[in-house]
Amino acid sequence: MQAIDSASSPISYAADIRQYLSFALGEEQYGIEILRVQEIKGYSGITPIPNTPAHIRGVMNLRGTVIPVVDLRARFSLPSRDYDKFTVIVVVTVGTRIIGLVVDAVSDVLDIGRNELRPAPDLGRREDTNFISGMAHVGERLVVLLDIATLLADDSLGETATVAPVAE
Amino acid sequence: MSIVESIAPRREQLRQVAGRGEVIVLRGEPLPAVRLNRLFRVASAAEENAALLAVIVDHRGKRLALLVDELLGQQQVVIKSLETNFRKVEGAAGATILGDGQPALILDVAAVAEMAKNCDWASSIPALLPISA
């Protein structure tokens, strides 16, 4: 409904503002394009998969479909933490695949205008930042916006690198 | 049906073979023994207690003993693809969803036999995965 309303409004709202789901990993705030997010689930029922990297926690049952679950803390080499009642799995779609991401807690949905987006920082050659699509200041917070397709592409999750980006 | 029988091997039935692997001597016949926990690098409580069970499987006429912690039961399941959202998992034919909603892997005996052939047992340190999530 909002898209229809904004299309008829004098300022072109939808074209310049994107919505991101923000979530926390430790002290840091991250964002994923909301169009990639399918649902948010509590952490439960993960079956470990042998001989996979530590950040692949295993697979879970999503209404009869078996989907992989990636721990983003482990993926970013952050110190691990016990899962608690705020720990959730953000279920995202990347191309035709459905993947669960374990995060500390989800925060809120942010509207971020294109002019608020800052490019990913250059942290030196050793630090690969391809999976950061940009950064944004939201109030007091600095939010790191993730390019999920790139992040998961080199994750032995299959050929996710070839998928098209989310439609504008 | 790949499974021929399941036994609780006595200590003396399990034999090391020239540091290259183990066999189970079953009714006078030595069968290659595969410690699934080492192949899959998971911790095994039964291995420490020497309380493993051996599931004898038949793969193209060759018999193989898979050493496991415990047998839980037998049931018919619907095979779900792991590749739809994830990728091929070596040694697994697919997954299924158990009655409690938890996914479980389905072993591919042929692939497990192949993995066992190429496994460097000395370097396969167990206890890299928790026993349960």
Image (cartoon, grey):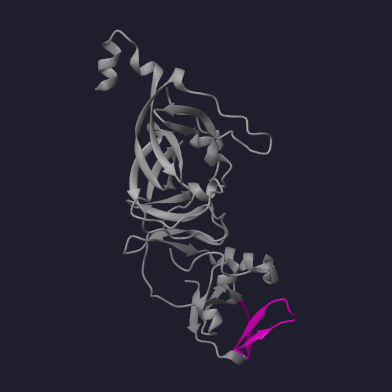
Residue A158 position by quadrant = top right
Q: Is residue B20 magenta?
A: yes
Q: Position of residue A116 (x, y in %)?
A: 45, 21
The part of the chain drawn in magenta is B13-33
- Residue under the image location 35 percent in, 63 percent down: B98
Q: Does any portion of residue A128 appear in the rendered image?
A: yes
For residue B24, above or below residue A31: below
For residue A156, above or below residue B78: above
Q: Position of residue A5 (x, y in %)?
A: 25, 16
Q: Does any portion of residue B59 appear in the rendered image?
A: no
- Residue under the image location 63 percent in, 33 percent down: A123
Q: Position of residue A115 (x, y in %)?
A: 45, 17
Residue A98 position by quadrant = top left
- Residue under the image location 30 percent in, 13 percent down: A7
Q: Quadrant of the C terminus of chain B?
A: bottom left
* Front-lying residue, A136 or B55: A136
| Residue lying at the far right of the rendered structure | B18
- Residue under the image location 54 percent in, 75 percent down: B57
* Front-lying residue, A13 or B5: A13
